[in-house]
Image: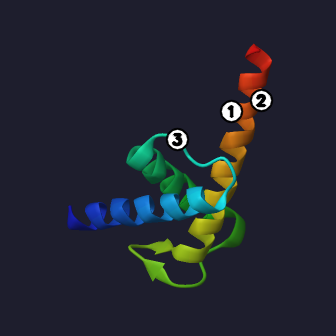
């Protein structure tokens, strides 16, 4: 149970960092940051593997890069959907 809590906290921090780096930002506050961190960790691991410092079985550098990619793609989709409705 404690491991899950630590993983979620690390995912929130990674999501916040990714949201700060990527243009557009991640909506949804802490929940959005947690989703961006978890999805970013998955994307980062799939694209870059597991290298660099690891906390709670999350490779930090690939996870941050993956979170930036996820937030950027999400902002592009959001802008496209917004412009399509106007």
Q: Which residue: 77% across, 15% down?
A: 86
Left or right placement of residue 53 versus residue 70 in this view: left
Closer to us: 68 or 21:
21
Q: Give above or below for 36 relative to 44.
A: above
User: Hey, which residue is sitting farthest bottom in the picture?
Assistant: 52
Closer to us: 1 or 36:
36
Left or right placement of residue 3 versus residue 79 in this view: left
Left or right placement of residue 25 versus residue 7 in this view: right
Q: Which residue: 43% across, 45% down?
A: 29
Q: Which residue: 65% across, 51% down?
A: 70
The alpha-carbon separation of the residues under discs 1 and 2 comes to 5 Å
Quadrant of the image occupied by residue 62:
bottom right
The alpha-carbon separation of the residues under discs 3 and 2 comes to 16 Å
Assess whether mark 1 and mark 3 are in contact (beta carbons under 8 angstroms). Answer: yes
Q: Earlier in the sequence, mark 3 or mark 2?
A: 3
Q: Position of residue 11 (x, y in %)?
A: 43, 61
Q: Position of residue 8 (x, y in %)?
A: 35, 59
Q: Give above or below for 58 relative to 37.
A: below
Q: Give above or below for 35 relative to 60.
A: above
Assess whether mark 2 and mark 1 are in contact (beta carbons under 8 angstroms). Answer: yes
The N terminus: image quadrant: bottom left
Q: Position of residue 42 (x, y in %)?
A: 57, 58
Callout 3 secondary element: loop
Q: Earlier in the sequence, mark 3 or mark 1?
A: 3
- Residue marked by disc 2: 80
The alpha-carbon separation of the residues under discs 3 and 1 comes to 10 Å
Q: Which residue: 53% across, 52% down?
A: 36
Query: What number is the disc on residue 27?
Result: 3
Query: What number is the disc on residue 78?
Result: 1
């Amino acid at each position: 149970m404690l491991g899950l809590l630590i993983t979620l906290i690390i995912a929130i921090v990674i999501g916040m960092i990714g949201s700060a780096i990527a243009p557009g930002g991640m909506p949804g506050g802490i929940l959005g940051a947690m989703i961006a961190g978890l999805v970013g960790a998955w994307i980062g691991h799939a694209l870059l593997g597991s290298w660099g410092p690891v906390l709670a079985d999350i490779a930090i550098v690939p996870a941050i890069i993956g979170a930036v990619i996820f937030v950027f793609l999400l902002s592009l989709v959001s802008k496209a959907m917004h412009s399509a409705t106007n």
